[in-house]
């Protein structure tokens, strides 16, 4: 069974970029994605790169029936 993973805690290394994006999946399902950023130091270097992670809000109407199981083929091909 899939359960939510609360990876964003007050002590997180991720910082909120303040950006949100609307993402359309198959032209039928639309979700909103929040952009988080984590600085990743370079190996034996004075540089860093930024890892960008997206957190999706629950789609409305939610195609989820039980936990995280839903008919992906129907939602993405119709």
Image (cartoon, rainbow, N blue to C red):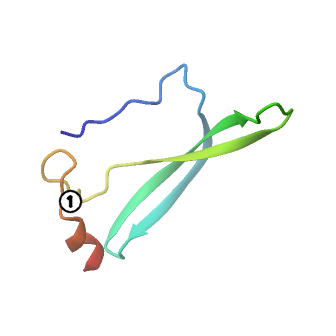
Q: Is residue 4 left or right of residue 69?
A: right
Residue drawn at x 60%, y 27% is 13
Residue drawn at x 52%, y 21% is 10
Spot occupied by residue 44 in the image (x, y as percentages of width and height): 82, 30
Q: Quadrant of residue 15?
A: top right
Spot occupied by residue 33 in the image (x, y as percentages of width and height): 47, 53
Q: Residue furthest top?
A: 11
Q: Residue furthest bottom?
A: 78
Q: Residue furthest front?
A: 44
Q: Residues within 10 Å of mark 1 (few under 14, many from 20)?
A: some
Q: Residue furthest right?
A: 46
Q: Is residue 18 left or right of residue 4?
A: right
Q: Is residue 7 left or right of residue 43?
A: left
Residue drawn at x 44%, y 30% is 7
Residue bearing mark 1: 63
| Helix, strand or loop for disc 1 | loop
Residue drawn at x 37%, y 65% is 30
Q: Is residue 47 left or right of residue 58?
A: right
Figure quadrant of the C terminus? bottom left
């Amino acid at each position: 069974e899939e359960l939510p993973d609360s990876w964003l805690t007050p002590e997180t290394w991720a910082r909120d970029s303040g950006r949100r994006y609307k993402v359309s999946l198959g032209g039928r399902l639309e979700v909103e994605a929040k952009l988080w950023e984590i600085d990743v130091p370079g190996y034996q270097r004075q540089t860093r790169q930024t890892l960008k992670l997206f957190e999706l809000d629950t789609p409305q109407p939610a195609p989820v029936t039980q936990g995280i199981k839903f008919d992906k083929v129907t939602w993405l091909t119709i």
